[in-house]
Amino acid sequence: MSNEQPYIETAKEVAGKAIGRHGLIYITIIVAMGVGASVVLEEGKMAAVMGLLGASLTALISMLNGVAGANPKQEKPEFEIMKELIHRLDGMADRDPMSVQVEGDKVIVRKGDNETAIERK
């Protein structure tokens, strides 16, 4: 008697096969829905429908790429921008502090050795 367990496919394998088999049909249906909506709907409603269709196409294509392993996971560019801004702001922390003083109708702004006074007219 054999004690071998049957091979159980992972969710990624199952999804990859299903999307691989039917992915082109899904994309074609989504594009056809967009064309049909452009014929039937008014201009004001078209933007929302096209936005949803574009988002669904983008999601489907990214799923195809992810399942196929076509592109490695990349760090999002907005995180890189945030890291760079934080680094720049940290570098500015050692500069001269700024202070603002309000006396009646007069505002005095001091930064380092510079002082600017502005009065309301």
Image (cartoon, rainbow, N blue to C red):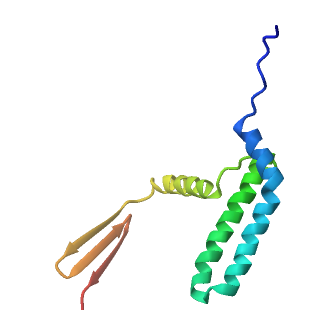
Q: Is 42 located above or below residue 93 in the figure? A: below
Q: Position of residue 31 (x, y in %)?
A: 75, 72
Identified at 80% across, 45% down, the residue is 17
Q: How many marks?
A: 0
Q: Nearer the viewer, residue 33 or 61?
A: 33
| Quarter of the figure with the N terminus | top right
Q: Is 21 located above or below residue 121 in the figure? A: above
Q: Could you say which quadrant of the image residue 33 lies in?
A: bottom right
Q: Is 17 located above or below residue 76 in the figure? A: above
Identified at 65% across, 66% down, the residue is 55
Taking the view exactly as shown, the residue that stands out farthest to the front is: 1
Left or right relative to 88: residue 10: right
Q: Position of residue 118 (x, y in %)?
A: 29, 82
Identified at 67% across, 80% down, the residue is 37
Identified at 70% across, 76% down, the residue is 34
Taking the view exactly as shown, the residue that stands out farthest to the bottom is: 121
| Quarter of the figure with the C terminus | bottom left
Left or right relative to 78: residue 68: right
Q: Nearer the viewer, residue 99 or 76?
A: 76
Q: Position of residue 105 (x, y in %)?
A: 19, 82
Q: Nearer the viewer, residue 70 or 78?
A: 70
Q: Position of residue 80 (x, y in %)?
A: 62, 54
Taking the view exactly as shown, the residue that stands out farthest to the left is: 104
Q: Is 98 located above or below residue 48 in the figure? A: above
Left or right relative to 26: residue 80: left
Q: Nearer the viewer, residue 89 or 109?
A: 89
Q: Could you say which quadrant of the image residue 29 lies in?
A: bottom right
Q: Could you say which quadrant of the image residue 109 lies in?
A: bottom left
